[in-house]
Amino acid sequence: MSPLFPALAAGSTRPALHFGDQALSHAELATVAGALAARIAGAPRVAVWATPTLGTAVGVVAALLAGVPVVPVNPKTGERELTHIVTDSSPALVLAERGVELPPILAALERLDTDVTGVMGEAGPAVPLPAEPSPEDPALIVYTSGTTGPPKGVVLPRRAVTATLDALEDAWQWTEADVLVHALPLFHVHGLILGILGPLRRGGSVRHLGRFSTEGVARELSTGATMLFGVPTMYHRIAEALADDPALAKALTGARLLVSGSAALPVHDHERIAAATGRRVIERYGMTETLMNTSVRADGEPRAGTVGVPLAGVELRLVDEAGAGITTYDGDTVGEIQVRGANLFTEYLNRPDATGAAFDDGWFRTGDMAIRDPDGYVRIVGRKATDLIKSGGYKIGAGEIENVLLEHPGVREAAVTGEPDEDLGERIVAWIVPAQADAPPSAEELAAHVGAQLASHKRPRTVRYLDALPRNDMGKIMKRALRG
Ligand code: MCA
Ligand code: AMP
Protein backbone atom coordinates (compact mmCIF):
# COMPACT_ATOMS: atom_id res chain seq x y z
CA MET A 1 0.00 0.00 0.00
CA SER A 2 1.18 3.56 -0.66
CA PRO A 3 2.16 5.46 2.48
CA LEU A 4 -0.70 7.13 4.33
CA PHE A 5 0.99 10.51 3.85
CA PRO A 6 3.02 10.63 0.61
CA ALA A 7 3.88 14.33 1.04
CA LEU A 8 5.53 13.62 4.40
CA ALA A 9 7.58 10.83 2.91
CA ALA A 10 8.60 13.15 0.05
CA GLY A 11 9.63 15.94 2.44
CA SER A 12 7.41 18.56 0.76
CA THR A 13 8.12 22.08 1.98
CA ARG A 14 4.54 23.18 1.28
CA PRO A 15 2.47 24.29 4.30
CA ALA A 16 0.63 21.47 6.09
CA LEU A 17 -0.84 22.52 9.43
CA HIS A 18 -1.81 25.94 10.81
CA PHE A 19 -3.23 26.42 14.29
CA GLY A 20 -3.27 30.13 15.11
CA ASP A 21 0.30 31.35 14.88
CA GLN A 22 1.78 27.84 14.96
CA ALA A 23 2.43 26.20 11.60
CA LEU A 24 4.35 23.26 10.14
CA SER A 25 5.21 22.31 6.56
CA HIS A 26 4.97 18.66 5.51
CA ALA A 27 8.75 18.38 5.88
CA GLU A 28 8.71 19.91 9.36
CA LEU A 29 5.83 17.63 10.32
CA ALA A 30 7.83 14.66 9.06
CA THR A 31 10.68 15.75 11.34
CA VAL A 32 8.66 16.27 14.50
CA ALA A 33 6.18 13.44 14.04
CA GLY A 34 8.92 11.12 12.81
CA ALA A 35 10.96 11.75 15.97
CA LEU A 36 7.90 11.15 18.15
CA ALA A 37 7.00 8.04 16.12
CA ALA A 38 10.39 6.56 16.92
CA ARG A 39 9.59 6.91 20.64
CA ILE A 40 6.10 5.44 20.30
CA ALA A 41 6.97 2.52 18.00
CA GLY A 42 6.20 -0.84 19.53
CA ALA A 43 3.53 0.40 21.95
CA PRO A 44 0.29 -1.57 21.65
CA ARG A 45 -1.88 1.58 21.65
CA VAL A 46 -1.62 5.28 22.51
CA ALA A 47 -4.16 7.80 23.72
CA VAL A 48 -4.05 11.38 22.46
CA TRP A 49 -5.48 14.14 24.62
CA ALA A 50 -7.29 15.69 21.69
CA THR A 51 -7.38 19.43 22.32
CA PRO A 52 -7.95 21.49 19.15
CA THR A 53 -4.22 22.19 18.83
CA LEU A 54 -1.21 21.55 16.64
CA GLY A 55 0.13 19.09 19.22
CA THR A 56 -2.89 16.83 18.75
CA ALA A 57 -2.36 16.68 14.99
CA VAL A 58 1.34 15.95 15.51
CA GLY A 59 0.60 13.23 18.07
CA VAL A 60 -1.93 11.48 15.84
CA VAL A 61 0.35 11.61 12.80
CA ALA A 62 3.25 10.30 14.90
CA ALA A 63 1.20 7.32 16.07
CA LEU A 64 0.05 6.60 12.52
CA LEU A 65 3.63 6.78 11.25
CA ALA A 66 4.68 4.39 14.01
CA GLY A 67 1.85 2.00 13.12
CA VAL A 68 0.47 2.28 16.66
CA PRO A 69 -3.35 2.50 16.95
CA VAL A 70 -4.40 5.84 18.37
CA VAL A 71 -7.33 6.59 20.66
CA PRO A 72 -8.33 10.27 20.49
CA VAL A 73 -9.79 11.40 23.81
CA ASN A 74 -12.22 14.31 24.19
CA PRO A 75 -10.57 16.57 26.79
CA LYS A 76 -14.05 17.58 28.03
CA THR A 77 -15.03 14.02 28.90
CA GLY A 78 -16.26 13.39 32.43
CA GLU A 79 -14.95 10.80 34.83
CA ARG A 80 -17.15 7.81 34.03
CA GLU A 81 -16.83 8.08 30.26
CA LEU A 82 -13.08 8.64 30.46
CA THR A 83 -12.61 5.68 32.80
CA HIS A 84 -14.57 3.49 30.39
CA ILE A 85 -12.54 4.62 27.36
CA VAL A 86 -9.19 4.19 29.07
CA THR A 87 -10.09 0.84 30.62
CA ASP A 88 -11.60 -0.49 27.41
CA SER A 89 -8.77 0.60 25.09
CA SER A 90 -5.91 0.23 27.60
CA PRO A 91 -3.41 2.63 26.02
CA ALA A 92 0.23 2.17 27.02
CA LEU A 93 1.07 5.84 26.58
CA VAL A 94 -0.62 9.19 26.47
CA LEU A 95 0.38 12.00 24.14
CA ALA A 96 -0.46 15.51 25.27
CA GLU A 97 0.79 19.04 24.93
CA ARG A 98 3.47 20.06 27.38
CA GLY A 99 2.10 21.57 30.58
CA VAL A 100 -1.48 20.33 30.16
CA GLU A 101 -2.80 18.79 33.34
CA LEU A 102 -4.31 15.35 32.75
CA PRO A 103 -6.95 13.59 34.87
CA PRO A 104 -5.51 10.93 37.23
CA ILE A 105 -6.37 7.90 35.09
CA LEU A 106 -4.30 9.32 32.22
CA ALA A 107 -1.67 10.97 34.39
CA ALA A 108 -0.87 7.47 35.68
CA LEU A 109 0.31 6.43 32.18
CA GLU A 110 3.68 7.15 30.63
CA ARG A 111 3.39 10.53 28.96
CA LEU A 112 5.05 11.99 25.88
CA ASP A 113 4.85 15.69 25.00
CA THR A 114 3.76 16.73 21.53
CA ASP A 115 5.64 19.99 21.81
CA VAL A 116 6.82 21.41 18.48
CA THR A 117 8.62 24.59 19.43
CA GLY A 118 12.17 23.35 18.79
CA VAL A 119 11.46 22.03 15.32
CA MET A 120 9.51 24.76 13.59
CA GLY A 121 11.67 26.01 10.74
CA GLU A 122 13.64 22.77 10.40
CA ALA A 123 13.31 20.95 7.08
CA GLY A 124 13.58 17.33 6.12
CA PRO A 125 13.04 14.17 8.14
CA ALA A 126 15.63 13.87 10.90
CA VAL A 127 14.84 10.20 11.38
CA PRO A 128 13.84 7.80 8.62
CA LEU A 129 10.09 7.23 8.65
CA PRO A 130 9.04 3.71 9.65
CA ALA A 131 7.88 1.28 6.95
CA GLU A 132 4.17 1.44 6.09
CA PRO A 133 2.17 -1.07 8.17
CA SER A 134 -0.35 -3.49 6.64
CA PRO A 135 -3.62 -1.99 5.31
CA GLU A 136 -5.67 -4.08 7.74
CA ASP A 137 -3.75 -2.84 10.79
CA PRO A 138 -5.86 -0.63 13.06
CA ALA A 139 -5.15 3.08 12.59
CA LEU A 140 -7.58 4.65 15.06
CA ILE A 141 -10.08 3.66 17.70
CA VAL A 142 -12.83 6.27 17.85
CA TYR A 143 -15.49 6.10 20.55
CA THR A 144 -19.11 6.60 19.55
CA SER A 145 -22.37 6.47 21.50
CA GLY A 146 -25.04 3.82 21.07
CA THR A 147 -28.64 3.86 22.29
CA THR A 148 -27.74 2.24 25.61
CA GLY A 149 -24.60 1.56 27.59
CA PRO A 150 -21.22 3.27 27.36
CA PRO A 151 -19.69 4.37 24.03
CA LYS A 152 -18.17 1.69 21.80
CA GLY A 153 -14.64 1.84 20.38
CA VAL A 154 -14.81 1.73 16.59
CA VAL A 155 -11.66 0.10 15.22
CA LEU A 156 -10.75 1.79 11.95
CA PRO A 157 -8.10 0.08 9.83
CA ARG A 158 -5.63 2.02 7.70
CA ARG A 159 -7.34 0.94 4.47
CA ALA A 160 -10.63 2.51 5.63
CA VAL A 161 -8.86 5.84 6.12
CA THR A 162 -7.13 5.75 2.73
CA ALA A 163 -10.27 4.44 0.95
CA THR A 164 -12.44 7.23 2.31
CA LEU A 165 -9.94 10.03 1.76
CA ASP A 166 -9.20 8.90 -1.79
CA ALA A 167 -12.92 8.60 -2.60
CA LEU A 168 -13.33 12.19 -1.37
CA GLU A 169 -10.39 13.28 -3.54
CA ASP A 170 -12.40 12.01 -6.50
CA ALA A 171 -15.80 13.37 -5.39
CA TRP A 172 -14.54 16.81 -4.40
CA GLN A 173 -11.64 17.18 -6.85
CA TRP A 174 -9.58 17.69 -3.73
CA THR A 175 -5.93 18.50 -4.53
CA GLU A 176 -2.70 19.66 -2.90
CA ALA A 177 -3.69 23.20 -3.89
CA ASP A 178 -6.62 23.12 -1.47
CA VAL A 179 -6.42 24.94 1.83
CA LEU A 180 -9.09 23.72 4.23
CA VAL A 181 -10.50 25.78 7.08
CA HIS A 182 -12.43 24.23 9.95
CA ALA A 183 -13.09 24.43 13.68
CA LEU A 184 -14.24 20.88 14.37
CA PRO A 185 -13.16 18.89 17.42
CA LEU A 186 -10.22 16.52 16.85
CA PHE A 187 -11.61 13.44 18.63
CA HIS A 188 -14.16 12.46 15.96
CA VAL A 189 -14.01 11.32 12.37
CA HIS A 190 -15.21 14.60 10.87
CA GLY A 191 -12.61 16.93 12.38
CA LEU A 192 -9.70 14.49 12.67
CA ILE A 193 -9.85 12.07 9.75
CA LEU A 194 -11.47 14.34 7.15
CA GLY A 195 -10.27 17.64 8.53
CA ILE A 196 -6.63 16.88 9.43
CA LEU A 197 -5.62 13.58 7.81
CA GLY A 198 -7.46 14.55 4.59
CA PRO A 199 -5.35 17.61 3.77
CA LEU A 200 -2.18 15.79 4.86
CA ARG A 201 -2.90 12.84 2.55
CA ARG A 202 -3.52 15.23 -0.37
CA GLY A 203 -0.31 17.16 0.32
CA GLY A 204 -2.42 20.27 0.90
CA SER A 205 -3.01 22.20 4.11
CA VAL A 206 -5.49 22.93 6.87
CA ARG A 207 -6.03 26.01 9.01
CA HIS A 208 -7.77 25.12 12.26
CA LEU A 209 -9.60 27.93 14.01
CA GLY A 210 -9.32 26.50 17.52
CA ARG A 211 -12.88 27.59 18.18
CA PHE A 212 -15.62 28.20 15.63
CA SER A 213 -16.48 31.78 14.74
CA THR A 214 -17.95 33.30 11.60
CA GLU A 215 -15.16 35.93 11.78
CA GLY A 216 -12.51 33.20 11.64
CA VAL A 217 -14.20 31.54 8.68
CA ALA A 218 -14.43 34.87 6.82
CA ARG A 219 -10.80 35.73 7.58
CA GLU A 220 -9.38 32.44 6.34
CA LEU A 221 -11.59 32.13 3.26
CA SER A 222 -10.63 35.65 2.20
CA THR A 223 -6.90 34.98 2.65
CA GLY A 224 -6.31 31.87 0.61
CA ALA A 225 -8.38 29.07 2.17
CA THR A 226 -10.40 27.23 -0.50
CA MET A 227 -12.64 24.78 1.38
CA LEU A 228 -14.79 24.84 4.52
CA PHE A 229 -15.93 21.79 6.49
CA GLY A 230 -18.58 22.20 9.17
CA VAL A 231 -21.51 20.67 10.98
CA PRO A 232 -25.01 22.09 10.29
CA THR A 233 -24.89 24.17 13.50
CA MET A 234 -21.90 26.06 12.08
CA TYR A 235 -23.65 26.64 8.73
CA HIS A 236 -26.77 27.75 10.63
CA ARG A 237 -24.68 30.31 12.52
CA ILE A 238 -23.15 31.42 9.21
CA ALA A 239 -26.63 31.73 7.65
CA GLU A 240 -27.75 33.84 10.62
CA ALA A 241 -24.71 36.13 10.37
CA LEU A 242 -24.75 36.62 6.59
CA ALA A 243 -27.45 39.29 6.48
CA ASP A 244 -25.28 41.75 8.43
CA ASP A 245 -21.84 40.63 7.31
CA PRO A 246 -20.92 41.42 3.69
CA ALA A 247 -17.30 40.33 4.31
CA LEU A 248 -18.51 36.85 5.30
CA ALA A 249 -20.72 36.66 2.20
CA LYS A 250 -17.81 37.70 -0.03
CA ALA A 251 -15.47 35.18 1.58
CA LEU A 252 -17.94 32.31 1.08
CA THR A 253 -18.61 33.37 -2.50
CA GLY A 254 -14.90 32.98 -3.22
CA ALA A 255 -14.57 29.49 -1.71
CA ARG A 256 -14.09 26.49 -3.98
CA LEU A 257 -16.15 24.10 -1.84
CA LEU A 258 -18.43 24.40 1.20
CA VAL A 259 -19.12 21.00 2.76
CA SER A 260 -21.57 20.13 5.54
CA GLY A 261 -21.91 16.81 7.34
CA SER A 262 -22.53 14.89 10.61
CA ALA A 263 -26.25 15.76 10.56
CA ALA A 264 -28.82 17.09 8.10
CA LEU A 265 -28.46 20.72 7.01
CA PRO A 266 -31.98 22.18 6.91
CA VAL A 267 -33.10 23.34 3.46
CA HIS A 268 -33.84 26.79 4.92
CA ASP A 269 -30.16 27.27 5.80
CA HIS A 270 -29.08 25.91 2.40
CA GLU A 271 -31.31 28.48 0.72
CA ARG A 272 -30.25 31.41 2.90
CA ILE A 273 -26.58 30.74 2.20
CA ALA A 274 -27.20 30.32 -1.54
CA ALA A 275 -29.20 33.55 -1.67
CA ALA A 276 -26.50 35.59 0.10
CA THR A 277 -23.44 34.08 -1.59
CA GLY A 278 -24.53 32.45 -4.83
CA ARG A 279 -22.82 29.30 -3.53
CA ARG A 280 -24.39 25.95 -2.72
CA VAL A 281 -23.26 24.03 0.35
CA ILE A 282 -22.84 20.36 -0.52
CA GLU A 283 -23.62 17.56 1.93
CA ARG A 284 -21.86 14.29 2.50
CA TYR A 285 -23.07 11.43 4.68
CA GLY A 286 -20.92 9.30 6.91
CA MET A 287 -20.68 7.53 10.20
CA THR A 288 -17.87 6.69 12.61
CA GLU A 289 -18.19 3.00 11.64
CA THR A 290 -18.26 3.56 7.90
CA LEU A 291 -16.35 6.81 7.39
CA MET A 292 -17.87 8.48 4.30
CA ASN A 293 -20.59 6.78 2.27
CA THR A 294 -22.10 9.35 -0.05
CA SER A 295 -21.61 12.91 -1.21
CA VAL A 296 -22.87 15.47 -3.61
CA ARG A 297 -19.99 15.65 -6.07
CA ALA A 298 -18.11 18.88 -6.79
CA ASP A 299 -18.87 18.29 -10.48
CA GLY A 300 -22.43 17.09 -9.80
CA GLU A 301 -25.74 18.84 -9.37
CA PRO A 302 -26.09 20.29 -5.86
CA ARG A 303 -29.45 19.32 -4.41
CA ALA A 304 -30.47 20.65 -0.99
CA GLY A 305 -31.94 17.98 1.27
CA THR A 306 -29.89 15.18 -0.26
CA VAL A 307 -26.52 13.67 0.64
CA GLY A 308 -25.68 12.90 -2.98
CA VAL A 309 -24.58 9.60 -4.43
CA PRO A 310 -22.45 6.70 -3.16
CA LEU A 311 -18.72 7.41 -3.21
CA ALA A 312 -16.33 5.38 -5.36
CA GLY A 313 -15.89 1.93 -3.81
CA VAL A 314 -18.99 2.18 -1.58
CA GLU A 315 -21.90 -0.20 -2.20
CA LEU A 316 -25.17 1.14 -0.79
CA ARG A 317 -28.59 -0.50 -0.63
CA LEU A 318 -31.92 0.35 0.98
CA VAL A 319 -33.65 -2.46 2.83
CA ASP A 320 -37.33 -2.46 3.82
CA GLU A 321 -38.75 -3.59 7.16
CA ALA A 322 -39.14 -7.15 5.94
CA GLY A 323 -35.43 -7.26 5.07
CA ALA A 324 -35.95 -7.08 1.31
CA GLY A 325 -33.78 -4.85 -0.88
CA ILE A 326 -35.54 -1.91 -2.52
CA THR A 327 -34.59 -2.03 -6.17
CA THR A 328 -36.54 0.82 -7.75
CA TYR A 329 -35.66 4.41 -6.94
CA ASP A 330 -38.99 6.20 -6.94
CA GLY A 331 -38.13 9.03 -4.57
CA ASP A 332 -40.78 7.67 -2.21
CA THR A 333 -40.04 4.23 -0.77
CA VAL A 334 -38.24 4.35 2.57
CA GLY A 335 -35.63 1.78 3.64
CA GLU A 336 -32.68 1.44 5.96
CA ILE A 337 -29.31 2.37 4.44
CA GLN A 338 -26.88 -0.54 4.45
CA VAL A 339 -23.34 -0.22 3.14
CA ARG A 340 -20.36 -2.34 2.17
CA GLY A 341 -16.84 -1.37 1.10
CA ALA A 342 -13.22 -0.79 2.06
CA ASN A 343 -14.33 2.31 4.01
CA LEU A 344 -15.84 0.20 6.83
CA PHE A 345 -14.49 -0.42 10.33
CA THR A 346 -13.34 -3.89 11.36
CA GLU A 347 -15.03 -4.26 14.74
CA TYR A 348 -16.19 -2.65 17.96
CA LEU A 349 -13.31 -3.10 20.38
CA ASN A 350 -13.97 -5.92 22.88
CA ARG A 351 -17.58 -6.17 21.68
CA PRO A 352 -17.97 -9.18 19.34
CA ASP A 353 -21.70 -9.23 20.22
CA ALA A 354 -22.23 -5.66 19.03
CA THR A 355 -20.02 -6.19 15.98
CA GLY A 356 -22.06 -9.24 14.95
CA ALA A 357 -25.36 -7.44 15.44
CA ALA A 358 -24.22 -4.49 13.31
CA PHE A 359 -23.94 -6.52 10.11
CA ASP A 360 -26.54 -8.17 7.89
CA ASP A 361 -24.79 -10.73 5.72
CA GLY A 362 -21.68 -8.55 5.32
CA TRP A 363 -23.63 -5.30 4.95
CA PHE A 364 -23.36 -2.73 7.75
CA ARG A 365 -26.74 -1.59 9.06
CA THR A 366 -26.50 2.17 9.53
CA GLY A 367 -29.88 2.64 11.25
CA ASP A 368 -30.46 5.65 8.96
CA MET A 369 -33.69 5.62 6.96
CA ALA A 370 -33.66 7.05 3.44
CA ILE A 371 -35.27 7.26 0.04
CA ARG A 372 -33.50 7.55 -3.31
CA ASP A 373 -34.40 9.89 -6.13
CA PRO A 374 -34.82 8.22 -9.53
CA ASP A 375 -31.24 9.23 -10.45
CA GLY A 376 -29.80 7.66 -7.28
CA TYR A 377 -29.41 10.73 -5.02
CA VAL A 378 -29.94 9.67 -1.39
CA ARG A 379 -32.29 11.58 0.90
CA ILE A 380 -32.04 10.72 4.61
CA VAL A 381 -35.49 10.94 6.17
CA GLY A 382 -34.94 9.69 9.71
CA ARG A 383 -33.34 7.20 12.06
CA LYS A 384 -34.46 3.79 13.27
CA ALA A 385 -33.53 4.42 16.91
CA THR A 386 -35.47 7.10 18.77
CA ASP A 387 -32.92 6.90 21.57
CA LEU A 388 -30.13 8.48 19.51
CA ILE A 389 -29.88 12.25 19.56
CA LYS A 390 -27.81 14.38 17.17
CA SER A 391 -26.99 17.70 18.81
CA GLY A 392 -24.49 20.10 17.23
CA GLY A 393 -23.41 17.14 15.06
CA TYR A 394 -22.54 14.99 18.08
CA LYS A 395 -24.23 11.58 18.37
CA ILE A 396 -25.56 11.11 21.89
CA GLY A 397 -27.25 8.04 23.38
CA ALA A 398 -30.23 8.79 25.62
CA GLY A 399 -29.61 5.71 27.80
CA GLU A 400 -26.15 6.80 28.87
CA ILE A 401 -27.47 10.13 30.15
CA GLU A 402 -30.50 8.52 31.83
CA ASN A 403 -28.23 6.16 33.77
CA VAL A 404 -26.21 9.08 35.12
CA LEU A 405 -29.31 11.13 35.97
CA LEU A 406 -30.80 8.18 37.88
CA GLU A 407 -27.77 8.17 40.16
CA HIS A 408 -28.51 11.69 41.37
CA PRO A 409 -30.11 11.43 44.82
CA GLY A 410 -32.80 13.95 43.86
CA VAL A 411 -33.98 11.90 40.87
CA ARG A 412 -36.51 9.09 41.11
CA GLU A 413 -37.16 8.54 37.39
CA ALA A 414 -35.51 9.98 34.29
CA ALA A 415 -36.00 9.92 30.54
CA VAL A 416 -33.99 11.76 27.93
CA THR A 417 -35.25 12.87 24.53
CA GLY A 418 -34.09 15.11 21.69
CA GLU A 419 -36.24 18.07 20.71
CA PRO A 420 -35.91 20.10 17.52
CA ASP A 421 -33.54 23.05 17.97
CA GLU A 422 -32.88 25.66 15.29
CA ASP A 423 -29.21 25.95 16.18
CA LEU A 424 -28.22 22.47 17.34
CA GLY A 425 -30.59 20.39 15.21
CA GLU A 426 -31.72 18.63 18.35
CA ARG A 427 -31.43 19.71 21.96
CA ILE A 428 -31.09 17.28 24.88
CA VAL A 429 -34.13 17.36 27.16
CA ALA A 430 -34.27 15.54 30.50
CA TRP A 431 -37.66 14.55 31.91
CA ILE A 432 -37.34 14.12 35.64
CA VAL A 433 -39.56 12.72 38.36
CA PRO A 434 -37.95 14.18 41.49
CA ALA A 435 -37.42 12.04 44.58
CA GLN A 436 -39.06 14.82 46.57
CA ALA A 437 -41.73 16.70 44.67
CA ASP A 438 -41.31 19.82 46.78
CA ALA A 439 -37.51 19.97 46.41
CA PRO A 440 -36.54 18.99 42.83
CA PRO A 441 -32.86 19.28 41.85
CA SER A 442 -32.26 22.35 39.68
CA ALA A 443 -31.54 22.13 35.95
CA GLU A 444 -28.05 23.56 36.55
CA GLU A 445 -27.32 20.94 39.18
CA LEU A 446 -28.41 18.11 36.90
CA ALA A 447 -26.41 19.48 33.95
CA ALA A 448 -23.31 19.72 36.18
CA HIS A 449 -23.93 16.18 37.47
CA VAL A 450 -24.04 14.81 33.89
CA GLY A 451 -21.05 16.94 32.83
CA ALA A 452 -18.92 15.53 35.66
CA GLN A 453 -19.45 11.96 34.41
CA LEU A 454 -19.89 12.28 30.64
CA ALA A 455 -18.70 14.57 27.84
CA SER A 456 -19.78 18.20 28.26
CA HIS A 457 -21.98 18.15 25.15
CA LYS A 458 -24.12 15.42 26.78
CA ARG A 459 -25.45 17.82 29.42
CA PRO A 460 -29.22 18.37 29.17
CA ARG A 461 -30.03 21.86 27.94
CA THR A 462 -33.64 21.70 29.20
CA VAL A 463 -35.07 19.93 32.24
CA ARG A 464 -38.81 19.25 32.64
CA TYR A 465 -40.35 17.96 35.83
CA LEU A 466 -43.21 15.44 35.95
CA ASP A 467 -45.12 13.55 38.64
CA ALA A 468 -44.68 10.29 36.73
CA LEU A 469 -43.28 9.15 33.37
CA PRO A 470 -45.81 7.89 30.82
CA ARG A 471 -45.50 4.09 30.63
CA ASN A 472 -47.27 1.38 28.63
CA ASP A 473 -48.83 -1.77 30.10
CA MET A 474 -45.42 -3.45 30.09
CA GLY A 475 -43.97 -0.61 32.17
CA LYS A 476 -41.87 0.70 29.28
CA ILE A 477 -41.47 4.47 29.10
CA MET A 478 -43.43 5.89 26.16
CA LYS A 479 -41.00 8.52 24.93
CA ARG A 480 -43.22 9.59 22.08
CA ALA A 481 -45.68 10.88 24.68
CA LEU A 482 -43.00 13.18 26.11
CA ARG A 483 -43.34 16.46 24.27
CA GLY A 484 -42.69 20.01 25.39
C1 MCA B 1 -23.68 22.69 26.60
N1 MCA B 1 -23.09 23.63 27.32
C2 MCA B 1 -23.76 23.77 28.45
C3 MCA B 1 -24.83 22.88 28.39
N2 MCA B 1 -24.74 22.22 27.23
N3 MCA B 1 -23.57 24.56 29.51
C4 MCA B 1 -24.43 24.47 30.51
N4 MCA B 1 -25.49 23.66 30.53
C5 MCA B 1 -25.72 22.85 29.51
N5 MCA B 1 -26.76 22.06 29.56
C6 MCA B 1 -21.88 24.40 26.99
C7 MCA B 1 -21.07 23.85 25.85
O1 MCA B 1 -20.38 22.68 26.27
C8 MCA B 1 -20.12 25.02 25.61
O2 MCA B 1 -19.13 24.99 26.59
C9 MCA B 1 -20.96 26.21 25.88
O3 MCA B 1 -22.12 25.70 26.56
C10 MCA B 1 -21.32 27.05 24.69
O4 MCA B 1 -22.22 26.38 23.88
P1 MCA B 1 -22.45 26.80 22.36
O5 MCA B 1 -21.89 28.09 22.00
O6 MCA B 1 -23.84 26.46 22.01
O7 MCA B 1 -21.52 25.96 21.59
P2 MCA B 1 -21.45 24.45 21.64
O8 MCA B 1 -22.81 23.94 21.78
O9 MCA B 1 -20.44 24.03 22.64
O10 MCA B 1 -20.84 24.18 20.23
C11 MCA B 1 -21.54 24.09 19.04
C12 MCA B 1 -20.60 23.41 18.08
C13 MCA B 1 -20.27 22.03 18.66
C14 MCA B 1 -19.33 24.25 17.95
C15 MCA B 1 -21.26 23.29 16.72
O11 MCA B 1 -21.49 21.35 18.88
C16 MCA B 1 -19.35 21.22 17.82
O12 MCA B 1 -18.13 21.43 17.78
N6 MCA B 1 -19.89 20.20 17.11
C17 MCA B 1 -19.11 19.34 16.26
C18 MCA B 1 -19.47 17.91 16.51
C19 MCA B 1 -18.72 16.98 15.60
O13 MCA B 1 -17.58 17.20 15.21
N7 MCA B 1 -19.34 15.87 15.26
C20 MCA B 1 -18.73 14.92 14.38
C21 MCA B 1 -19.14 13.55 14.85
P3 MCA B 1 -17.60 25.10 26.30
O14 MCA B 1 -17.44 26.44 25.64
O15 MCA B 1 -16.97 25.00 27.63
O16 MCA B 1 -17.31 23.97 25.39
S1 MCA B 1 -20.01 12.76 13.54
C22 MCA B 1 -18.82 12.11 12.57
O17 MCA B 1 -17.64 12.27 12.78
C23 MCA B 1 -19.40 11.44 11.37
C24 MCA B 1 -18.43 10.46 10.79
C25 MCA B 1 -19.77 12.46 10.32
O18 MCA B 1 -20.62 12.18 9.48
O19 MCA B 1 -19.17 13.54 10.34
P1 AMP C 1 -21.50 9.41 14.22
O1 AMP C 1 -21.86 8.09 14.69
O2 AMP C 1 -21.27 10.43 15.24
O3 AMP C 1 -20.38 9.19 13.32
O4 AMP C 1 -22.72 9.95 13.38
C1 AMP C 1 -23.20 9.27 12.25
C2 AMP C 1 -24.60 9.68 11.95
O5 AMP C 1 -24.68 11.05 11.60
C3 AMP C 1 -25.20 8.97 10.77
O6 AMP C 1 -25.66 7.68 11.10
C4 AMP C 1 -26.32 9.92 10.37
O7 AMP C 1 -27.46 9.70 11.16
C5 AMP C 1 -25.74 11.28 10.72
N1 AMP C 1 -25.26 12.02 9.54
C6 AMP C 1 -23.98 12.20 9.13
N2 AMP C 1 -23.95 12.99 8.03
C7 AMP C 1 -25.23 13.33 7.74
C8 AMP C 1 -25.87 14.15 6.74
N3 AMP C 1 -25.17 14.80 5.83
N4 AMP C 1 -27.22 14.24 6.78
C9 AMP C 1 -27.95 13.60 7.71
N5 AMP C 1 -27.40 12.83 8.68
C10 AMP C 1 -26.07 12.70 8.70
Image: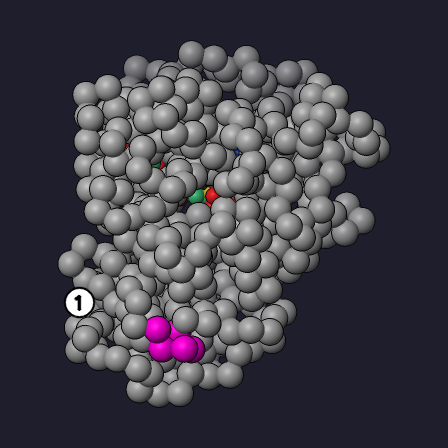
Q: Residue at x 20, y 26 (%)?
A: 246
Q: Residue at x 49, y 50 (%)?
A: 173
The boundaries of the magenta stretch are 8-12
Q: Does the image show residue 313?
A: yes
Q: In the rendered view, does 239 fall on the left or right side of 169?
A: left
- On the image, the x and y values in percent for residue 482 come to 50, 15
Question: Which SS class for mark 1?
Answer: loop
Q: In the rendered view, does 340 fall on the left or right side of 189?
A: right
- Whether 389 is among the magenta residues is no
Give the quarter of the figure containing the N terminus.
Answer: bottom right
Q: Residue at x 51, y 74 (%)?
A: 3
Q: Is residue 164 above or below residue 415?
A: below
Magenta part, dominant SS: loop
Q: Residue at x 56, y 66 (%)?
A: 158
Q: Nearer the viewer, residue 243 or 158?
A: 243
Q: Is residue 176 above or below residue 117?
A: above
Give the quarter of the figure containing the C terminus.
Answer: top left
The residue identified by callout 1 is 99
